[in-house]
Amino acid sequence: MFRFANTYYFYLFLLIPLLTLAFAWFLLWRRKAVSRFGDWVVVKQLMPEASVPKLILKFAGAMLTVAFLVLTLAGPQTGSRIEKAHRQGIDIMVALDVSNSMLAEDIKPNRLERAKQSISRLIDKLDGDRIGIIVFAGKAYTQLPITTDYAAAKLFISTISPDIVPTQGTAIGEAISRAIASYGETKNNKALIIITDGEDHEGDVMEKTKDAVKAGIAVYTIGMGLSEGAPIPIYQGNVMTGYKKDGSGNTVVSRLDESLLQQIASEGKGVYVRASNSETGLRPIMDEINKIQESEIESKQFTDYESRFQYFLAFAIIIMVADLFIFEKKTNWLKRIRPFN
């Protein structure tokens, strides 16, 4: 594994564009200063040994030296020893509905965005647990395999939108099947949190829930939506152009299907919580999940690193020394090389 121990030194890279701007200004100022003595073309002929390209080459060498010195200061390191780490935790898969009905705004700013915000806050509170993300609409997809990389999990959550699943619908059963497969052969305690409005569900959901229980997975459900429901907005780009209508031209109102989600939670040995504008439901569900006995999770990680700054410092010295032998005036022996004569 390769890493930098002191990444704050990377701010010194800002010197390179600043110095480049100063150098460009210097070349412009130099040309104007020389032009005061007469026409630029004529003055150039009076200074046959001057070489602007070599001056630029020297500057490029200096900037390359600065870059390698910054990398040296940043403390490049390579992992030299791997040890097994043991910690307590639970494997949590979150199956998030990304169908268009999740854009309804009965829960502000809308059902999907509120769910994403809650999952992100949940990740901030995890300690030792592993988390994975499944997105589903008409089909289910693994957005993030189960991991302890919480930063990656939050990054993936930020990219979730209805556009990432091309087929509309609410394939809860397929999402459960994919979650079962995502845990792999782990013997850790497992929990599946399904966040959906439950509308237009497809497939044998209850059978898939039974399969999850047989695999040792507790299934929890969160209903996103209010009882009165809300219309489904239609967007073109970031602009809302109207609301979804049925074949008769009436505005479609998306309502939460609580009965299905309650059945899934009951069959899945979990609990059901309905979201509201003040509470999305993840907190009470996590309170229930925390009652599950945590398993010991084994992982491998680098525990010792060796510094590799000497290689970057050597490159900086080599480039700096080479730069000293580049003179601003033209090289006579190069002028005698005429390959096309």
Image (cartoon, helix red, strand yellow):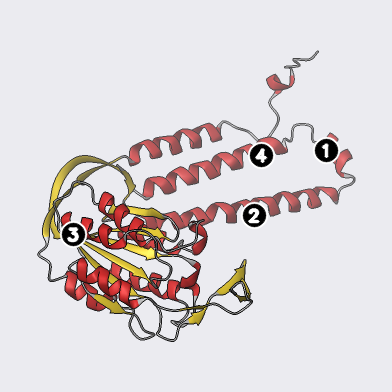
Task: Say which amino acid is labelled 2.
Answer: Leu
In this view, 59 is above or below 115: above
Seen in the image, is 126 located left or right of residue 74?
A: left
Are discs 1 and 2 less than 8 Å apart at CB? Answer: no
Q: State the residue at coordinates (72%, 39%).
A: 52
Regarding residue 296, the answer to whether it shows in the image is: yes
Regarding residue 76, the answer to whether it shows in the image is: no
State which tag comes first along the sequence, 1 or 2.
2
- Circle 3 or circle 1, nearest the eye: 3
Q: Name the residue under label 4.
A: 55
Secondary structure under badge 3? helix
Q: Name the residue under label 1.
A: 44
**Residues at marks 4 and 2, CA–CA distance in whole angstroms:** 15 Å
Question: Which of the numbered marks, if any, corresponds to residue 213?
Answer: 3
Q: Name the residue under label 2.
A: 21
Q: State the residue at coordinates (72%, 49%).
A: 27
